[in-house]
Amino acid sequence: MLKPIRTVITAAFLTIATVSVAQEMRGDHPDTYTVRRGDTLWDIAGKFLKRPWLWPEIWQANPQIKNPHLIYPGDVISLAYLDRVAVTQGPRDEAPLTGVPLKDVEPFLKNLRVVDEFEDLPYVVGLEEDRLRASLDQVAYVRGLADAQPGQRYAIVRPTVRYNAINPKRCCDVTTTKPEDLDFRGRTTKFTEQLWNHQMPASKGEFLGYELMQLTTATVSRGPGGQSDAATLVLDQSGREVRVGDRLIAVEAQPYDLQFFPHPPKQEFAYGKAKVLAVADMISTGGPRDVVALSVGARDGVDNGTVFSGWRVGSTTPDRVAVGDDRSPDAPGSKVRLPDEFSGHMMVFRTFDKVSYALVMDSIRPTRVGYELKHPDASN
C-alpha cells in the first residue's frame, strides 16, 4: 500500500523552482494519460513531470481546470504539447483524487499534541483494585471532573517532554534544542535523561510547550458523589497502559487532515531556527515512517503538508594538516567546519503554534535529534 506513496514522495522532493513546462516534462512522457481509480495527484505528476511539485502551477494555468485539487477518474490529461497541459473532462460519478490520503499514512502516525500548560487538567488519582497500571475494560478514578456525566468520553494523555529552545551561540554544533523529560506528575525529572537527549548547556531558551502523548480513551460510568471525590471511568480503547498522574482532555473527533498536499515551506528559516526536537517513542534515531517533533509551528508559517529536508549539522574539526603537530588544535584558524550531511525528507502532518510533528518519508541515513531542517530542494 505504501510503495506508491514512497515512490511519489521521493520523486516529488526534487525542487519547486518555477521553470517552463517544457523543461519539466519527462522526455518519455506519453501524449495522453487517463486518470485511474487509485491514482493520486502526486502519482500522476510523478509520471510525466521531472519536478512533480509544479503540478498546481501547470494545471492552474489551464482555464478548463477549475480546481487543480479536483481531478477525477476518467479525466484525460493531454501532454501532446510541451508548452501546455490540457484535461478532457471525464465522468463525475466517482470521488475526486487527493494528494496523500490519510489512510496511507495513518498507521504510522502518533497521537501527540503540544500545549502551553496542563497543570489544571483532570488527572488519574487511582486505578481499580489499587493496580499500578490499567488497560482496556479496566477502571480509572479521576479527580477534577466534578460535573462528569455518564457516557461522556475523554482522551487520557501523559505529559512526556517539555520543549525549550536555547541560544545556538551557547551551544555545540549538534543541536540548538533540549527536551526535558517529565515524570508521572508532569514535573521535570532530575539527574536522568532519556536515550535521545543530548547533553546540553544548562541555560534555557524560549519555552516551546509540553508534549502530551495520548494513551487511550475512557468513558465516564459514574461521577463523583457520596463518599468519593473521584469520577469513575472505564477504559474503552486498546492503547498504552494508564497510570496514576495521567491527564484527561476532550476527545478530538478528527485529529488529522483527511489528505495531505505536500509543499515546500512558505519561508526560509535562519540557520539554527528549525530543528528536529525529538524522535517519538523516546528513541535516538528515526527512519522512514517514524515521527519526529520539529521546533517550528504555525507561528512560523508551517502547516500540514509542509516538507523539509533533514541535515546532520557538519562537524567542526581541527585542520591537523595545516597546523601540524606544533600548534594547538584550538588556536585561531586551526578548525574547519565540515558540510552538513543530508539525511532524508519529512512531511508535517500535525501543527501547533510553536512545534509541529512530521513523518519521515524517505531517508539515506537515520534522522537524529538536533538535525537541521531546510527547504526540500536544498543542496547543502
Image (spheres, grey):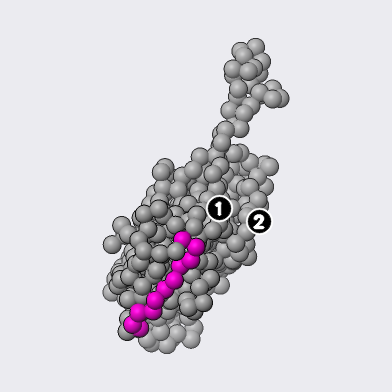
**Which one is in front in this view, the residue at disc 2 or the one at disc 1?**
1
Q: In the image, which disc is placed on residue 240?
A: none
**Residue 331 x, y percent position in the rendering:** 69, 22
Q: Nearer the viewer, residue 89 or 145?
A: 89
Does residue 291 appear anywhere in the picture? no
What label does residue 375 carry, if any? 1
* Quadrant that contains the N terminus: bottom left
The magenta stretch is 82-92
Q: Amino acid at mark 2?
A: Glu
Relative to the observer, which residue lies in front, 33 or 116? 33
Instruction: Report the residue at 40% width, 64% height from top.
Output: 80
Which secondary structure, mark 2? Answer: loop
| Secondary element at tag 1 | loop
Question: Who's the residue at 36% across and 64% down the image?
Answer: 31
Kindly identify the residue that appears in the image at 63 percent across and 18 percent down: 322
Whichever of callouts 2 and 1 sits on the residue coming sooner in the sequence is 2
- Residue at image location 32% in from the left, 59% down from the top: 4
In the picture provided, is 231 more to the left or to the right than 188?
left
Q: Is residue 286 left or right of residue 63?
A: left
Vertical placement of residue 271 versus 113, above or below: above
**Which quadrant holds residue 317?**
top right
Can residue 77 be seen here?
Answer: yes
Q: From the top left corner, tell me how far across and down residue 77 is, in percent.
A: 39, 70
Asked if labels 1 and 2 touch by Cβ distance under 8 angstroms, the answer is no
The residue at the far right in this view is 332
Q: Amino acid at mark 1?
A: His
Q: Which residue is mark 2?
A: 206
